[in-house]
Amino acid sequence: MRTTDGERAVGSYPAGTPEEALAFFTERFEALSFEVQLLEQRVNSGKLTPEEAAESIKTVRAQVTDANAVGDLASLVGRLDALAPVLAVLREARRAEKAEKAAESKAAKEAIVEEAEKIGAGSDWRNGANRLRDLLDQWKVLPRIDRASDDALWKRFSSARTAYTKARKAHFAEQDEKREGARIVKERLCKEAEALATSTDWGPTAGKYRDLMRDWKAAGPAPKDVDDALWKRFRGAQDAFFGARDAENAALDAEFAKNAEVKDALIVEIEALLPVKDLEATKKAFRDLADKWEAAGKVPRDRIKDLEGRMRTVETALRNAEDEQWKRSDPEKSARANDLVTKLEDAIAKVEADLDKARAAGNDKKVRELEENLESRRSFLEMARRASEDFSG
């Protein structure tokens, strides 16, 4: 074959005619031309990386240069040379792409490090560990950046994870210690509660249970399975005591129901004394009915407020009537005022005694009722004393 450098032997073909030989070596050229065409298409389309394209061009160039073929091989080499600018563009685009990905990777890693450091400095022991694991997985899939920056960021990330892990372990060690302390305290409280479960000293024991509950809450949580079992014991002891107390109160209420029936009848008679027309006669009748009222005894707890309220209404009306009477009375009635003072003082002494008993029994509701009753009687007594002093000169 003739070239710019002269003739070059491309091979021999002893098995056929000269025409067949020429066709054979011409087909080889056409095959090379087709391969160059495919390479041009792949390089121009950007389907090959710059490295892959350069290697393919090198390979095809070697095939064309030393080809045993008949055709314009120089034109094929020229077409391969023409791919050099395209390759340069690909390399520049690849460098820009790598630089962009490196910048994105660096920004992503910096964000990961900042979040990890925030977690490491915090105390989110429940979610922090899981989040750090997620951040580590994200780090692993990110491309490496320049070695110095990558190593520096990794060191910060690793330090944050280590600091968090140490703090978390210390926290849970402290919690375990506190839970063990709580277990000891709550076991003691359970024993105390169980020892009180059969007590029938209702008032003081109820107060002790309130103190035990306060101490229970202050002790904090024990290990969960232990805490649940201890609470079951503690609550069981409480329920046993208060159940027995409620049962006795229910029995007493049933027993006192008859007393309430008596007082229901008496209060109707007492209220019938109003309005006051004859003060002395009304007072005498009231005293007689009041004695029966006191003799009737206690009533169920849910009836106390109603009955005592109605009784106080009549007492107030009598006191008002007596005030009016005092305003109209002369000094000769001082003896009556003195007698009322004495009776009020006796009544107050009785209420005070009942109040002491209610306080000792821990009956808060009864205490409040008696305190109101006592306040009313003391106010009445003060007025009686002032009137007595006025009568005495």
Image (cartoon, rainbow, N blue to C red):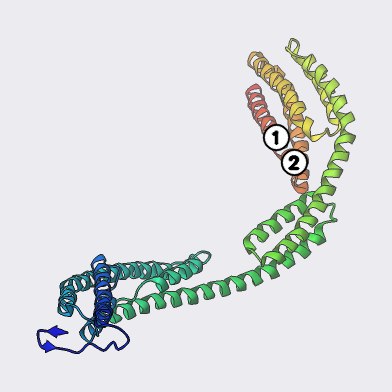
Q: Which residue is mark 2?
A: 355
Vertical arrangement, residue 309 with respect to residue 183, above or below = above
Q: Amino acid at mark 2?
A: Leu
- Report the quarter where the N terminus lies: bottom left
Helix, strand or loop status at disc 2 = helix
Q: Which residue is mark 1?
A: 374
Which is more N-terminal, label 1 or label 2? 2
Residue 220's mark? none
> Which residue lies at the image location 67% right of the left edge and 64% below the top edge?
224
> Which residue lies at the image location 70% right of the left edge and 30% below the top edge?
377
Q: Examine the rendering and report whether any part of residue 15 can be seen.
A: yes
Vertical arrangement, residue 272 with respect to residue 40, above or below = above
65 displayed left or right of 258: left
Viewer-proximal residue, 15 or 145? 15
Q: Position of residue 233 (x, y in %)?
A: 78, 60
Vertical arrangement, residue 22 with respect to residue 354, above or below = below
Vertical arrangement, residue 13 with respect to residue 98, above or below = below
- Report the quarter where the C terminus lies: top right
Circles 2, 1 touching at the beta carbon (< 8 Å): yes
113 displayed left or right of 31: right
Q: Position of residue 20 (x, y in %)?
A: 28, 79
